[in-house]
Amino acid sequence: MNTSAVGTSEGAGSNSLPSTPSEITAEWLGSVLGERISSVRVDPVGTGQTGATYRVTPVYAGPTRLPPSFVAKLPSQHAEVRERVALGYRAEHAFYTRVAHTLDVPVPQVFHCDIAGDGAEFVLVVSDLTPAVQGDQVRGCGQEQARLAVEALAGLHGPRWCDPAWVGFDGIAMPKADADFARGMGELARIAWERTLSGLGTRIDRDDRAVLAASADLVEGWLGLDDERFCLLHGDYRLDNLLFDPAKAVVTVVDWQTLTVGLPARDLAYFLGTSMESDARERSEVQLVETYRRRVLGYGIGEYSAERCWTDYRIGMLQIPLITTFGYAFTAATDRGDDMMLTMIRRGCHAIRHLGTIDLVAGLI
């Protein structure tokens, strides 16, 4: 994580939503926390491509029971990205204010969440989970971290599995697919694939390019598969969006900008297919998929056989090319972001070939 200082603000500020780190002032923070604050230090955290995240360390004017630091999330500091992903900020606001308390997924404590300007203005202030450490998407994870992540994912899906309220829920980036939506997503998938190939070119090998092209052609039909099993999906459930506390062996899930409704195993496949090196995934995926299945069954979802769950997992692998190419094509590029996308594409395409996902999906649609 990058911990270089943005600066220290004192005194100036307003009650409006801050759009830059310099606007996270002592006055503004004090107004939303209901506490007198003398000054505040703001340091960048991570290299988010669709949002900007900061560690905020206040100096309180007197005794307080509030934490010594917070994490604040603002919209991207790139205007073109901010406008493009405003829908994602609206999804994150909806999740924390309307949904999180109805689920069993571990999330940070929220101290303030506000939105304006049709979503382009957004601020989220949550607990600082230090010493928890962000997962490293490029490095990947082993079986123990994967197990923690899979169990947490069951806490997102299980409590409201097939809840009909999700069908009309307006606080999501991508709704449950109908024919028109699926057709539009199929067209966008081809555009995203072409932009990804144009930008990354020969850094993607020939076999992986073939998988990405075939996947883009299947997106429209894939989105309509297995309509009877659905729930709220994180949509981008991977290591960079998970914080692991090594002392407590717990995980916390963040970054809820890509909420969608669909086949639950899409989140599961996306996580295992992008966050573990291929040999590690192949050794442990049967056990991890079964761990997930048993956990969701514990929420009283009804019948969900091991065979059905495994097939869903194989189908769900197309979440990887969909999200990685969209992520590359429609967000701000960074060196680390390119390395991350290439790693996810490499792992994900290997998983798709290993599991026979292309042929499976093609035979079902």
Image (tube, helix red, strand yellow):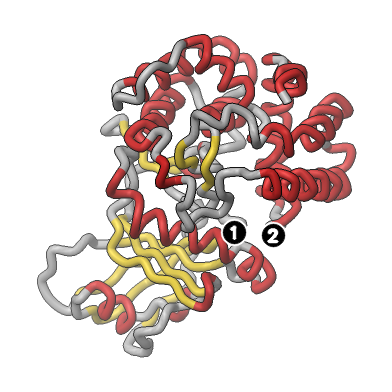
Closer to the camera in the image, 9 or 198: 198
Classify 10 Å Cα crowding around label 2: few (below 14), some (14-19), many (20 and above). some
Q: What is the CA distance from the residue labelled 1 to the residue labelled 2? A: 7 Å
Give the residue at mark 1: 50
Residue 249 % position (x, y) = 31, 30
- Residue at (19% x, 80% y) in the render: 36
The answer to whether residue 222 is above or below residue 232 is above
Chain-order first, disc 1 or disc 2: 1
Residue 29 % position (x, y) = 31, 76
Residue 8 % position (x, y) = 40, 77
Give the residue at mark 2: 332
52 left or right, relative to 34: right
Disc 2, SS: loop
- Residue at (55% x, 10% y) in the render: 283
41 left or right, relative to 272: left
Residue 103 got which mark?
none
57 left or right, relative to 256: left
Q: Quadrant of residue 30?
A: bottom left
- Residue at (44% x, 71% y) in the render: 115
Closer to the camera in the image, 359 or 66: 359
Quadrant of the rendering where the C terminus is positioned: top right
Classify 10 Å Cα crowding around label 1: few (below 14), some (14-19), many (20 and above). many
Residue 37 % position (x, y) = 24, 78
Q: Is residue 271 visible?
A: no
Are the residues tagged 1 and 2 within 8 Å (C-beta)?
A: yes
Farthest left residue in view: 63
Closer to the camera in the image, 171 or 351: 171
Q: Amino acid at mark 2?
A: Ala
Q: Amino acid at mark 1?
A: Thr
- Residue at (72% x, 15% y) in the render: 356
Q: Is residue 107 visible?
A: yes
Disc 1, SS: loop
